[in-house]
Image: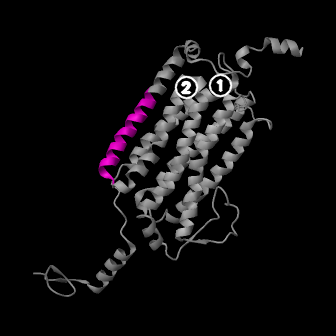
Amino acid sequence: MEGDANATLHPPCAPSEPPYSEEHLQSLDLPGRFLFAILTLMTLIANLVFIEEAVYIYRKIPSSKRSIIIWVNAAAPVIATTSCIGMWIPRSTMFTDFTAAVFFAIVIHKFLLMMIKECGGQKLLLRRFENGHFKISTGPCCCCCLCLPRVRITRRTLFWMKLGTFQFAFFRPVLMFLSIVLWTNGNYAPYNLSPKGAAIWISCFIGVLTILALWPVAIMFQQVRTLLVCKKIISKFALYQFILILNHLQTAIINILAMKRIIPCVPPLSSSARGAYMINQLLIMEMFLITLISRVVYRRRYDDLEPPECTAEEDGDNKQNPKIILNGTVSEGGLPRV
């Protein structure tokens, strides 16, 4: 009976390599080809919107913030582009996923630097929060450890926070390169999560590095979200979180469903290949929407925040020089204006 069941199993439904692009395109019906065209058009529009936004940022934003903001804005279009390539060429999915993962690892580090830059830079941030403390009992690492003491905001603390995000931007490409090397030797398969395979150990190590990288970003956001509310930092952080959840958590859930054969195979796509195909289609639509929303959120001039001592001097001048109305004219410090 078991042999008969295996004999009736369609070959593409068994674990195998994804089909070639020609074979996959020929198997599409008219609605499938129409969906392909729509998703490709959405990717093209997302890239055009990003290019237009990059030109605006280059012209309107100071050079100290220009490159960082462009990097953060590029996350959604880059993921949409890699997903579109993976949709057209199913066998390239592993490499496009690696490219998107490496790019977003750099974006996490850039987002932390962007929050520091929005406060006026590291020196001005230290002056603003000279006697302040970081709340480290926050997600995703220590959200349940409410007893953790607050850490004073110093130059050394900022260094460790930057190092926490930089390590992910550094080790993620190294681990991806190691995965490709092992894949060429037959020791790495993305869907083989057995203890004897390399994928499960590399994935676990990447998960730990990801948590350690997201923790400093959350700590910094909790500290500056009130100060930077005028610069829409809450909306920017929400977009960053959406990209993170959709590109990692959503992908992991669909991959698990595909490995458990809950997502059925549709020849010539096996269950795992169809799961990757669904992930690419979803990411294109989601990143397209995030690109349009990002254009609205980041479409403004980025004037620097005034230094704290300047604000204090202005408040002191207003108190020392009260404005008095004399015969319809306004005078400062009690002296009539001529």
Q: What range of the chain is rendered magenta?
A: 41-61
Q: Nearer the viewer, residue 266 or 176?
A: 176
Residue 253, picture quadrant: top right
Report whether 195 appears left or right of 119: right
Secondary element under disc 2, as helix, strand or loop, is helix
Query: Where residue 295 appears, x then y in whole percent?
Result: 40, 44
Q: Quadrant of the N terminus?
A: top right
In the displayed structure, would residue 253 be above or below residue 240?
above
Residue 36 seen by the camera: yes
Query: Which residue occupies 70% across, 47% down?
Result: 205
Residue named by callout 2: 87
Query: Which residue occupies 54% across, 59% down?
Result: 162
Secondary element under disc 1, as helix, strand or loop, is helix
In terms of secondary structure, what is the magenta stretch mainly?
helix
Residue named by callout 1: 273
Q: Quadrant of the C terminus?
A: bottom left
Q: Amino acid at mark 1?
A: Ala
Q: Amino acid at mark 2?
A: Met
Pointer 2 and pointer 1: residues touching (CB < 8 Å)?
no
Distance (Cα) linking label 2 and label 1:
10 Å
